Every structure is written in structure tokens, then in C-alpha cells.
Amino acid sequence: MQLKGKIAIVTGGSDGIGRHICLKLAAQGCRMAILGRNQGRLDAVVAETLALGAGEARAYSVDLTDSEALDAAAKAILDDFGGVDILINNAGVWHKTGPLDSISADMLLTTVQTNLTSVMQFTRHMLPALRDGDEAVVLNVVSKSGVVAQAGQSVYTATKYGVRGFTEVLKQDEAENGVRVAGLYQSGTNTGMFAKAGEEVPNRIFTEPDDLADVVVFMLSRPPKIWLHDVRVEL
Ligand SMILES: NC(=O)c1ccc[n+]([C@@H]2O[C@H](COP(=O)([O-])OP(=O)(O)OC[C@H]3O[C@@H](n4cnc5c(N)ncnc54)[C@H](OP(=O)(O)O)[C@@H]3O)[C@@H](O)[C@H]2O)c1
């Protein structure tokens, strides 16, 4: 796919992996719709993407666990851009590692709603516009936890296995509609995700989000007859 001028939506583009994906796509000349909750971080990423060459960049401050707010943001993006070529479902949260009963009921719901429910709800909104395009892509930033079950990650793993299942079915359902679907299954990445959940991890040895964003650009920018639909990235 030729990326210049393509309309790309990145959920969770205000921080971490999503922010780096926004910066790399901006450098390719994409038009960017960037979602997150924190307005200050979103504004900073919009400024960075414009400086790097984005054809356009707009921020949408939305809590994706609020389904009415999600609906409104999806509508606003389609009104503002008039379509979409690339949807990157990336927003996600981590819960502190531990047995199931150490995870609060609130955290359990937040994790499922952010990592799984909102991915399906948001994609559902975007599908008609994606099908209208000549080349369209849904890329789900999943996790190694979508493929490998690891102790202490019950709820997180359930959401990521869920996104993998969703990705696999979407691939088949949209094959006839010209929408290509992919999942990215990466292991530990050096972002603030774990610290936000109060977890200490050896972040410094993890994959750099900037390098992971290069992988995303590589996946998206292949020639038309090549589609990398499952990519696993390990340390
Ligand atoms: N870091 C890792 O080791 C790792 C490994 C494998 C997979 N992943 C996955 O990669 C994705 C990105 O993770 P990351 O490490 O970049 O995390 P991060 O640095 O914490 O960034 C998470 C992003 O998601 C947004 N977000 C979280 N909850 C949201 C909500 N309710 N509504 C809207 N936006 C929300 C955040 O927005 P605000 O800034 O506004 O809060 C932020 O932009 C996640 O799906 C994660 O599960 C991460």
C-alpha cells in the first residue's frame, strides 16, 4: 500500500506504541485521526505528527470504555475525514499480574472493555467506510498474550485471545470486501503500560516502541500482492 495521503486512525495514539505508530505514519504523509483520553498528550502528538509531514492530524479525546462516547468519536472522525483507509486498533491497558481474585472487579471490566469490547465496537463503526475504499486495512495491535497463556495474566490474556479470535474471523468475513486484516503479536515493549498498572517490569530490555512502529509501517507498505497478516515480534 502506498501510504502517502491515506487516512489512518490510531486508537491509543496518545502514548506508547500508538504514539510511535502515529509518528511513523505521519512521516509517510498519512492523514491522521488520533484517539486517546488525555487531551494534553493527544495535542502533543498532533503537533509532532504535523511537524513530521502528516497531511492532516486531528485528536479525538475519548474514553473507549464509554460506548456512547465511542459512537460519537467514530461519527466525528468519519464526518471530519469523509472515510478511512487504515484502522489501527491499539489502545489497551494492563492489569497487575496476579491470581484472578487479586484483580478488582473494576479493573476486570476496564480491561475487557478497553482491550476487547471497544475494538469490536469501533471496528464495527468503521467497516462500511473501509469497504468503500480501494485499499483498506484493519491492523490489530494484540500481544504475545493473544497466543501464549502466561501465569497471572488471566483477564489480560482473555482479552488478547479474544482479539485474536476476532481478528481471524474478521479476516475471513472481509476477504470478499477488499478489507485486509492483520494481527501484531508482540512481546514486552518499553512503554509506560506496566507502570500505569503499578507493575514493575524490566522495561529497559523490552522492544522499543519506535522499532515496533517500523514493523507496522513495513506491514502496511508492502506491494499489493503481499499481505503480512500475522506478525509475531519477540525480544
Ligand atoms: N507494552 C507492552 O509490553 C505490550 C506488549 C504487548 C502488547 N501490548 C499492547 O499494545 C497496545 C499499546 O500498549 P502500550 O504499551 O503502548 O500502552 P501505553 O503506553 O499505556 O499506551 C496506551 C494507549 O491506550 C490509550 N488508552 C488506554 N485506555 C483507554 C481508554 N479507555 N480509552 C481511550 N484510550 C485509552 C492510552 O490513552 P491515554 O494516554 O489518554 O490514557 C494510550 O494512548 C495495547 O493494546 C497493549 O495491550 C503492549
Image: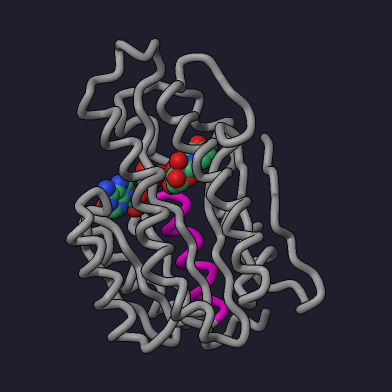
Quarter the N terminus occupies:
bottom right
The one nearer the camera, 42 or 93, is 93
Q: Is residue 206 visible?
A: no
Q: Nearer the viewer, residue 202 or 161?
A: 161
Report the residue at 39% width, 31% height from top: 194
Q: Looking at the picture, how far across and down is residue 33, in whole percent?
A: 36, 73
Question: Can residue 227 be seen?
Answer: yes
Residue drawn at (57%, 78%) of the image: 28
Whether residue 131 is situated above or below residue 165 in the rendered picture: below
- Pick whichever, 205 or 129, lies toward us: 129
Q: Which residues are magenta?
A: 15-28
Q: How is the image coloured?
A: one colour
219 on left or right of 154: right
Asked whether 24 falls inside the magenta stretch, the response is yes
Left or right of 6: which side holds 233?
A: right
Q: Residue at x 40, y 79 (%)?
A: 51
Q: Main secondary structure of the magenta part?
A: helix
- The image shows residue 213 at horizontal and vertical percentages of 57, 58
Q: Is residue 170 toward the left or the right of residue 79 in the image?
A: right
- Residue occupying image coordinates x 35% and y 22%: 96
Can you give x and y, in whole percent of width and height, for residue 94 in the image? 38, 33
